[in-house]
Amino acid sequence: MDQDQILARITAMVDDERRLRDALAAGQIDGATEHARLGQLERDLDQCWDLLRQRRAKSEFGENPDEAQVRPSSQVEGYQS
């Protein structure tokens, strides 16, 4: 995935997150469903942001950004700001 594809995926997931919260507020889904779906979205978002950061870092240091790899969510979730 190139940078534009990653950013498009992030935008789509943020839109999904918004729709889920709206569906919960409208009573269309229950809290457990929203929680499960949001959890997966958050993990996927973290992976996308991590991939984007990897690509940017590789570019900055003269490496090939296409060599960046999606890391497991278990690894990405452990990062701290």
Image: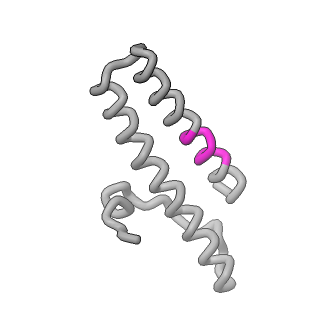
| Residue 17 drawn above or below residue 61 | above
Going 65% across and 80% down the picture, which residue do you hit? 63
Residue 25 in the figure: left or right of residue 51: left
Going 30% across and 26% down the picture, which residue do you hit? 31
Q: What is the residue that sits farthest to the left in this orientation?
A: 32
Residue 9 vs residue 27, the one in the foreground:
27
Going 62% across and 44% down the picture, which residue do you hit? 11
| Residue 79 drawn above or below residue 45 | below
- Membership of 12 in magenta stretch: yes
Quadrant of the image containing the C terminus: bottom left
Q: Which residues are magenta?
A: 8-14
Q: How many numbered discs? A: 0
Q: What is the residue that sits farthest to the front in this orientation?
A: 25
Q: Position of residue 20 (x, y in %)?
A: 46, 28
Q: Position of residue 3 (x, y in %)?
A: 68, 59
Quadrant of the image containing the N terminus: bottom right
Residue 65 vs residue 11, the one in the foreground:
11
Locate residue 51: give its quadrant: bottom right
Going 34% across and 63% down the picture, which residue do you hit? 75
Locate residue 27: give its quadrant: top left
Q: What is the residue that sits farthest to the bottom in this orientation?
A: 61
Q: Position of residue 40 (x, y in %)?
A: 38, 40
- Coloring basis for residues: one colour
Q: What is the residue that sits farthest to the top in this orientation?
A: 28
- Membership of 16 in magenta stretch: no
| Residue 75 drawn above or below residue 29 | below
Q: Position of residue 6 (x, y in %)?
A: 63, 52
What secondary structure is the magenta-colored segment mainly? helix
